[in-house]
Amino acid sequence: MAKRAGGARKKLRRGLWSPEEDEKLMNHIAKYGHGCWSSVPKLAGLERCGKSCRLRWINYLRPDLKRGAFSQEEEDLIIHLHSMLGNKWSQIAAQLPGRTDNEVKNFWNSYIKKKLRQRGIDPATHKPLAEVAAAAAACTRTPAVFSDAELILSSIGAQPPLTESYMYYDGSRCSTECGATASASAGVGGGGGCSDGSLTSLSGYSQATAEFTGGYVADGAHALLHCGGAGPASSGGGAPPAVIPSVSSSSTLNSMAGLSPAATTTDERYGNNSRGSPTNHDGHHHHHLPWLELGPSTAASAADVDHYGAALDELKWSDYVFDGYNNQLPPYNHGGIQGQCIYGDSKVDTAVHFDAHALGNWC
DNA sequence: AAGTTACCCAACCGCCGGATT
DNA sequence: GAATCCGGCGGTTGGGTAACT
């Protein structure tokens, strides 16, 4: 790669950021914006590389960050988007106001992945573990390579995936929308609304190329998302794809999903502790993703997804400046909606003051 | 109480692609 | 067109800490 100009380089600091460094960075960006990231550390008086500054800002200091535990809606959305986009964390995070790709990625790796496995779903493919393992075994490949599903199955025994686990939503949740019919028909090999094809459908949106692979697939997604035992979803073909809402801005989706850039209240189910594992998901069923209820007429294509993403990009900074800043104070400030001292209570008194008023100018 | 394990998450690393020179 | 610069992304690591023995 390109070499940097300059001779003897100053040894750059690494590791965790101190409150003083955060303060410097925030003050600098508040006054001047970040501009060229590579020049930020110099101008801000930091012994960090620009990349590190950028990361710190994006993942931690940005005023619009939500922080706190993920809500059920967010979790559902992440799973859904991952089934379509794969590990495109930045794209997934773009649909979640106030969340960073790093945060989403961590949440996926530490929680959702595990949860899906427990339910007999291969997190990589969003298909039942048994199905993935069978498919892998059927094809010829290097014997030393095992899929996630195979490893899981070999460790837990080749038990069939839980019937209800074939759904992203557990039985109780599903039943709230689909009733007994869907629950009864949700078996891996069975027919019916939530049957075979549902997860295949979601992975039908190619993870590698982000292209739709077929109508049946999308139709299956419809089946999955609606958990319906009747209607077009149960037929397994013909209906137009209904995978993602045909919306063109984050705020649209947010409102549809019951989220708002400004709605940064902590989901109490997980507690305020950001480290707190969401261990009691089944306690509440705010399973309300209105766009999941959209019919085939609201189908969106991959182009829509791109358009959607582009619109989001346009909105990002305005969201940061207006919704984000106006509604949320930086993490140091306990008065913030998601107020959370990032250095722990023992350091709350640490005198960290940034030029909050100037933040409004950094665009 | 002390030691060990498991988990979370902030930060780093390396690669890539676009823009500029 | 090549070299360089830069921002962005996804994968990985390691420190801190809660949970467990």
Image: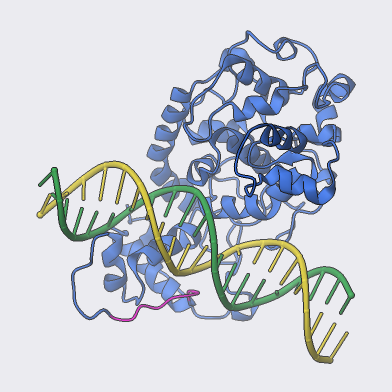
Chain colours: A blue, B yellow, C green
Residue appearing at x 78%, y 32% in the figure: A166
Task: Mark yes or no: residue A114 visible.
Answer: yes
The x, y position of residue A75, in whole percent, is 67, 43
Q: Is residue A9 above or below residue B13?
A: below
Residue appearing at x 64%, y 53% in the figure: A109
Q: Is residue A9 above or below residue A138?
A: below
Dividing the picture into quadrants, the one containing residue C6 is: bottom left
Indicate whether residue A146 is drawn in magenta: no
Indicate whether residue A16 is drawn in magenta: yes
**Quadrant where the N terminus of chain A is found in the figure:** bottom left
The x, y position of residue A24, in whole percent, is 38, 73
- Looking at the image, which is closer to me, A59 or A233? A233
Magenta: main secondary structure equals loop
Part of the protein shown in magenta: A10-17
The x, y position of residue A16, in whole percent, is 50, 74
Task: Mark yes or no: residue A100 visible.
Answer: no
Q: In the figure, is residue A62 to the left or right of A214? A: left
Residue extending furthest top? Answer: A238
